């Protein structure tokens, strides 16, 4: 992690890395003329989140002058930095991390940009307001909402889905926070199945007790319990990232995304609820060898399929080849599935040569008769996939 420029920047960078993992979190990236682009940049798939951090102590002057002075220094300057970073990114295809590593940006026509201002120091003596601050919508977090937003939305898909819904709400209604902040909107969003039930409203007054009530509710406790095992998925991603960043598994020096990176992106794009389902399926598969199943298929977020496979590390080349073929069969047998990610590992128990994981990425948007014939041949050789399982929608 970059050292950052201030203690507050270090803190924000650390919670971003914890939530979005270090492959997609870029503290203090370098922009125009070698200067800092923003305080933190999140890039994963087609999503870009630009984060600016300002920590300005509020001085109460007894009139509006103190309010205006703090707002200008903490929110307006933060928004200005974000818009400046966005302009630079709009003309770029890549950027340089603080540590010198080059990172490729998603294609310009596919990018979805979100703007987050972390404006600290007011201790909620001044109301903070997300919205169009001059050049499009900026989400404003303070010291009270920061932990809630990044703590409860700790996958990139959950995070940007919430921001997208808030942006749509801002575009159709005026939102007034009665002593609270964006964390109260988050509680409403989570309690209503990741949506806002205000289709016809043009004015919303949000009370500051909503989030506190949610944290104390049985709904919150049930949600946390259901997600408990899902963090194994995060550890699995981190395992592969460690190999990637240390050149232990992938060729990373060519400044070009590899199929293995794309596989990791698909793993990272799985929301928290789907990660829980994937881990349940993977754990059951590993812990029931008596079923003698060589592979298990799980359908996940955005019509992505995951193939879990077991094979010995003593012949990794053959293991990877079989995993790839099984992924092709899944793609051919499930027309709605365009992307398949395969994950292979050793059986549980003793191993003569140690333990390892392998990963395979298949992305075939369209197929023809030749491909169909190949799939039929492969499936005949491998045998039918028994006990395919599907992730339940959270």
Image (cartoon, rainbow, N blue to C red):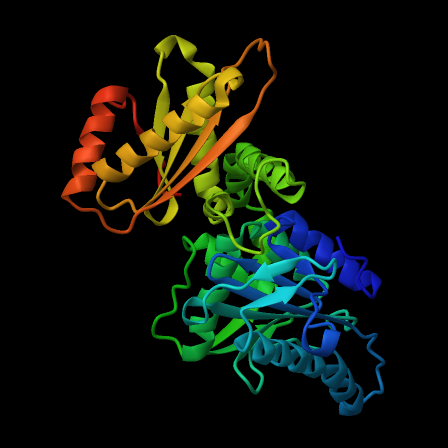
The residue closer to the viewer here, 111 or 301, is: 111
Q: Where 226 sits versus 174, above or below?
A: above
Q: Residue furthest front?
A: 254
Residue furthest to the left in view is: 369
| Residue 315 on image: x %, y % | 49, 18
Q: Can residue 199 be seen in the rendering of this structure?
A: yes
In-image side of 192 versus 92 (left or right): left
Q: Is residue 267 left or right of residue 66?
A: left
Marks counted in the figure total 0
233 left or right, relative to 148: left
Residue 247 % position (x, y): 64, 40
Q: Residue at x 46, y 61 (%)?
A: 46
Determine whether 384 is above or below 111 in the image: above
Q: Decide which of 34, 224 is in the foreground and name it.
A: 34
The residue at 47%/49% (across/down) is: 269
Residue located at (65% from left, 62% from top): 145
Q: Which quarter shows the C terminus?
A: top left
What x and y, as percent, mark residue 8? 79, 63
Check the image and report above or below for 283 versus 225. above
| Horizontal arrangement in the rendering, residue 150 relative to residue 331 (left or right) | right
- Kindly indicate the quadrant of the structure image that contains residue 169: bottom left
Q: Position of residue 244 (x, y in %)?
A: 61, 42
Residue 299: name its quadrant. Answer: top left
Which residue is drawn at the image coordinates 57% and 41% (left, top)? Answer: 250
Can residue 173 be seen in the rendering of this structure? no
Quarter-of-image position of residue 372: top left
């Amino acid at each position: 992690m970059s050292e950052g420029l201030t203690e507050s920047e270090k803190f924000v960078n650390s919670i971003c890395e914890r939530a979005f993992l270090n492959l997609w979190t870029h503290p203090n990236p370098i922009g125009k003329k070698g200067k800092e682009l923003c305080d933190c940049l999140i890039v994963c798939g087609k999503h870009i989140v630009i984060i600016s951090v300002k920590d300005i102590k509020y001085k109460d002057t007894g009139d509006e002058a103190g309010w205006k002075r703090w707002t200008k220094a903490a929110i307006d300057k933060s928004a200005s930095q974000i818009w400046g970073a966005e302009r630079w990114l709009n003309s770029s295809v890549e950027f340089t991390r603080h540590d010198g590593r080059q990172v490729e940006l998603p294609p310009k026509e596919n990018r979805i940009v979100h703007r987050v201002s972390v404006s600290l120091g007011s201790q909620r003596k001044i109301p903070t307001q997300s919205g169009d601050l001059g050049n499009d919508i900026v989400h404003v977090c303070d010291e009270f909402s920061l932990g809630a937003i990044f703590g409860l939305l700790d996958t990139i898909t959950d995070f940007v889905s919430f921001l997208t819904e808030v942006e749509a709400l801002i575009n159709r209604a005026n939102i007034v926070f009665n002593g609270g902040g964006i964390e109260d909107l988050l509680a409403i969003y989570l309690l209503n199945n990741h949506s806002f039930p205000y289709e016809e409203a043009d004015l919303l007054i949000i009370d500051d007790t909503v989030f506190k009530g949610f944290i104390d509710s049985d709904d919150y406790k049930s949600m946390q319990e259901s997600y408990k095992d899902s963090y194994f998925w995060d550890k699995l991603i981190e395992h592969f990232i460690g190999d990637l960043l240390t050149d232990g598994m992938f060729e990373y020096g060519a400044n070009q995304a590899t199929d293995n990176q794309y596989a990791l992106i698909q793993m990272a794009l799985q929301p928290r609820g789907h990660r829980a389902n994937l881990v349940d399926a993977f754990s059951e598969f590993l812990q029931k060898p008596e079923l003698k199943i060589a592979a298990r298929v799980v359908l996940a977020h955005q019509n992505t399929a995951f193939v879990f496979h077991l094979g010995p590390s003593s012949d990794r080349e053959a293991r990877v080849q079989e995993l790839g073929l099984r992924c092709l069969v899944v793609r051919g047998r499930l027309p709605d599935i365009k992307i398949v990610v395969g994950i292979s590992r050793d059986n549980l128990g003793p191993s003569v040569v140690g333990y390892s994981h392998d990963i395979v990425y298949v992305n075939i948007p369209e197929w023809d008769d030749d491909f169909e014939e190949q799939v039929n041949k492969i499936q005949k050789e491998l045998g039918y996939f028994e006990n395919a399982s599907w992730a339940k929608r959270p």
